[in-house]
Amino acid sequence: MPVCGYSQESGVSFSLCRSAETRSTVSRPQAIRMSQQYLANHAMIARRLGKPLVLQELALSRDGGAFIATAPTTSRDRYFDALLRSVHESAEVAGAQLWAWAGEGRPKEAGVHWVLGDELIGDPPQERQGHYSIFDTDVTTVATIAKWSTRFHEYT
């Protein structure tokens, strides 16, 4: 997905990765539209190739770029809901992989890099811990995932 960076509850902004050299800040609705367009473009390519498409590493950090498990996830929830809806509505998209389940795991210290002996959570060692992690206490995020998971199972 082309979206990276973090969200902010007030005046939500997303950093859109176009290349290593350029980044632009867009609103959450713009980020959703651009991500949906990205998905639609790749679904069209998958259709031409006769291959399924899997959306990988669908992620957005916690509101305000926070790393602590108690920080709100309003922007992430809305982003996930919109993109999972697009995945569900596309015949070419076989599924989505969310980034990243941490479950009951918690970093020793939020926002620092993983070191030997720390719990393994969703974020890889080279990233600051808690950034993209989906914790078991993220009730609204888990509910959004469950809602779309149930709808995806309707196809099987």
Image (cartoon, helix red, strand yellow):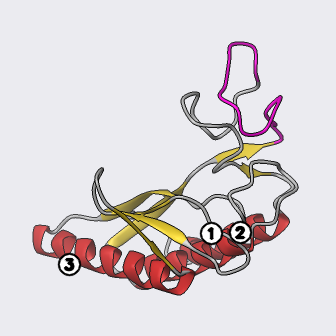
Q: Which of 148 and 117 is in front in this view?
A: 117
Per the image, label 2 sits on a secondary structure element best described as helix
Residue on which the image places disc 1: 149
| Amino acid, disc 1 | Ser
Residue type at the position of mark 3: Met
The label nearer to you, 3 versus 2, is 3
Residue 101 picture location, percent across and down: 67, 47
> Mark 1 touching mark 2, by CB under 8 A?
yes
Q: In this view, does 99 lie to the left or right of 142?
A: left
Q: Is residue 23 left or right of residue 21?
A: right
Q: Name the residue under label 3.
A: 44
Instruction: Give the side of residue 119 with respect to residue 58, left or right.
Output: right
Residue located at (71% from left, 64% from top): 64
Q: In the rendered structure, which segment of residues is drawn in magenta?
A: 104-118
Query: Quadrant location of the N terminus?
Result: bottom left
Magenta span contains residue 137: no
Q: Which residue is drawn at 58% across and 27% down?
A: 125
Q: Residues at badges 3 and 2 in contact (C-beta under 8 Å)?
A: no
Q: On the image, numbered disc 2 is attached to which residue?
A: 146
Q: Position of residue 152 (x, y in %)?
A: 55, 73
Depth order, front residue of 14/101? 14
